[in-house]
Amino acid sequence: MKKSGIIILILLLAAGAAAYFFRFEIFQVSAENIIKKNLPPFISVDTFDFDLKSGILTASGVGIKNPGRYRNRYLAHIDTVVCAYKMRGKQILDGIEITDIKAAGVVINIERLPDGRINVNEMEQIMGDGRKKPEIPADQKNKTEEKAPGMFDISNLIKLTETINIKNGQVNFIDCGIKNFKQYGLTVRDARAKAVIRLNRDYTGVLSVGATGTGNINGDSSQRISWVVYLDPGSSALTMSNRIEASNLDITLFKPYYDQYAPVEIDRGRFSGTIVLDFDNGNIGSMNTLRLSDLRFRQKTGFTGAVFWDVALPDIIKYLQSSPGEITFDFKIKGSMENPMFYPGPVVKEALQQMTVDKISRLFQSSGSEGEETSGGASDADKVFDAIKGFLDKK
């Protein structure tokens, strides 16, 4: 009996030593299984790796599913997400708190369908637990809700930080909702950004998304942009604010968006400057100041887009022709996404007024040369001209 007792004791000690020696591997397997089992169905993860000594959790192959009927399987896919964390207790079931998130190899797909629907506005459809919760009888509402074995509230298991630091990112814009264009695409590459994502209490809905960052257009390092973006995904129509600083962008890349409204056919050109583009439930509020360079264009024939402009388009064309090297073109956009209206900004407005003053000046100078002077030394034509000039300067 003593021998058998000693053998059992040795086996227990050996098992304990093995459990201690392999404690990280055991924790790794149990933690990975628990977290994967409790992830929302719209999120998939290939592997988790816990570094208990350093307090680092690495997730590989993270996917956020796209709503139905969109081209790409994922709205976002991330190669690796590295999270600094701390344990809330002695075991994984006590929960962990994510204190820092860094994401690398991020690909985000922003898509618009022909009917105008945008995938980021439809995320509410696939968020939540993916199942319709059954009606709870009145006599059962006060009882504790039972969960399936191994199931936990993910928001109790993991506390997330709102900020994600992104490097080596890519944003694909795929637009099938532009008139006369079957599909249009544009890519921001080499993106570095800081995203702030606010979730509701149980992580079943996105309250807001914001981001600041930089990147280049279609992989061309000479075409740089930086942005500050805020999105309200819960609005019924697009509600979003955008401030973009552009540097040396090729104008013709954006032809699908300006062609319907531009009175000229642009053959080439570059632009730099500030674009402020806000959407409030689909209504636009925009103020843009651009520096156009190396601009080459032709006047369109049979142009029908004059209804979108609150200014005489021949004057706009003449203004663009006035400085072929570089010229400032500022303009406002108001109205709905379907029927926007364009207005000249302060710089263009002042230039157009000066063009009108110069035109009137030449007209009155030619007619006033033969006019009689009044007792004050000025002709009647000069007086009329001064009055018109003063009126225009005040507008």
Image: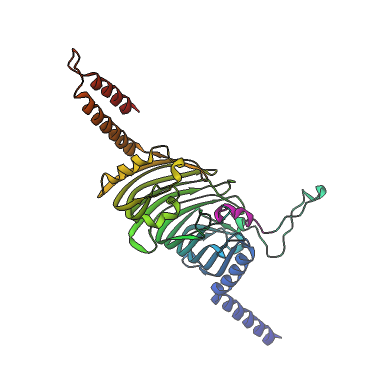
Q: Which residues are drawn in magenta?
A: 117-130
Residue ranking furthest to the top = 375
* Residue at image point 55% right, 54% down: 120
Q: Nearer the viewer, residue 138 or 332?
A: 332
Placement of the C terminus among the 4 image quadrants: top left
Residue 51 % position (x, y)? 49, 68
Q: Residue at x 36, y 38 (%)?
A: 345
| Residue 354 x, y percent position in the rendering | 28, 33
Work out whether residue 388 or residue 213 is closer to the camera in this orientation and state it: 388
Q: Is residue 355 visible?
A: yes
Q: Is residue 172 visible?
A: no
Please indicate whether residue 237 sits to the left or right of residue 104 in the image.
right
Question: Residue 28 appears at what percent x and percent y?
Answer: 56, 71
Q: Residue at x 32, y 54 (%)?
A: 270
Q: Position of residue 260 (x, y in %)?
A: 45, 50
Q: Is residue 20 left or right of residue 373?
A: right
| Residue 64 included in the magenta stretch of the image | no
